[in-house]
Image (cartoon, grey):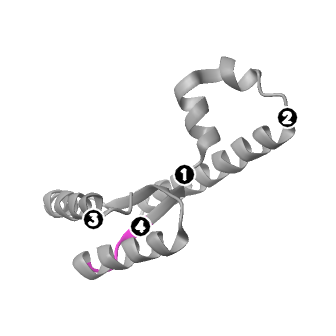
C-alpha cells in the first residue's frame, strides 16, 4: 500500500529484518495510481537506501477470485474477465520470478 502508515511499517520491518543478512524485498500491493507507487518507492529508498521494491496493482477480478473462489470464476460469461485475470496472474508471476532470482544470488 502507498499510504504513510504502510510505508512507515515497511521501513520499521526492514530495519528489524536487516540484521539477519537475508535479501529483503518490499512489494507494494493494491496501488491504483502509478504516481503514488513511484512516490512510495522514492520515500522507501530515501529512508532505506537502494533496495528491491516491486509493485502489484490492485485488480478487482483477482481479488474476487481469491475471495469467492473458482465457482465464482467459472460463472463469468465474458472473455474480458478471463483476459484480465490472466494479465494479473502474469504480473504476479513476474514479481515472484524476480524474488526467486534475488534469492539465488
Q: Earlier in the sequence, mark 1 or mark 2?
A: 1
* Quadrant holding the C terminus: bottom left
Q: Overall secondary structure of the magenta stretch?
A: loop
Foreground pick, 17 / 68: 68
Residue marked by disc 3: 4
Q: Pointer 4: residues within 10 angstroms few (<14), some, or many (20+)? A: some
Residue marked by disc 4: 53
Disc 1, SS: loop
Q: Earlier in the sequence, mark 4 or mark 3?
A: 3
Residue marked by disc 1: 58
Label 1, label 3: how far apart the Cα atoms are: 18 Å
Q: What is the total number of numbered labels drawn onto the structure image?
A: 4
Disc 4, SS: strand
Q: Hey, which quadrant is residue 71 in on the image?
A: top right
Residue marked by disc 2: 78
Q: Are marks 4 and 3 in contact (CB under 8 Å)?
A: no
* Magenta region, residue range: 49-53
Q: Earlier in the sequence, mark 2 or mark 3?
A: 3
Disc 3, SS: helix
Amino acid at each position: 500500500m502507498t499510504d504513510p502508515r504502510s510505508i512507515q511499517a515497511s521501513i520499521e520491518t526492514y530495519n528489524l529484518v536487516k540484521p539477519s543478512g537475508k535479501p529483503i524485498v518490499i512489494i507494494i500491493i493494491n496501488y491504483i495510481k502509478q504516481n503514488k507507487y513511484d512516490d512510495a518507492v522514492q520515500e522507501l529508498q530515501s529512508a532505506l537506501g537502494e533496495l528491491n521494491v516491486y509493485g502489484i496493482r490492485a485488480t478487482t477480478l483477482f481479488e474476487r477470485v481469491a475471495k469467492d473462489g473458482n465457482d465464482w470464476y467459472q460463472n463469468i460469461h465474458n472473455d474480458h474477465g478471463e483476459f484480465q485475470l490472466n494479465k494479473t496472474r502474469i504480473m504476479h508471476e513476474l514479481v515472484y520470478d524476480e524474488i526467486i532470482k534475488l534469492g539465488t544470488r
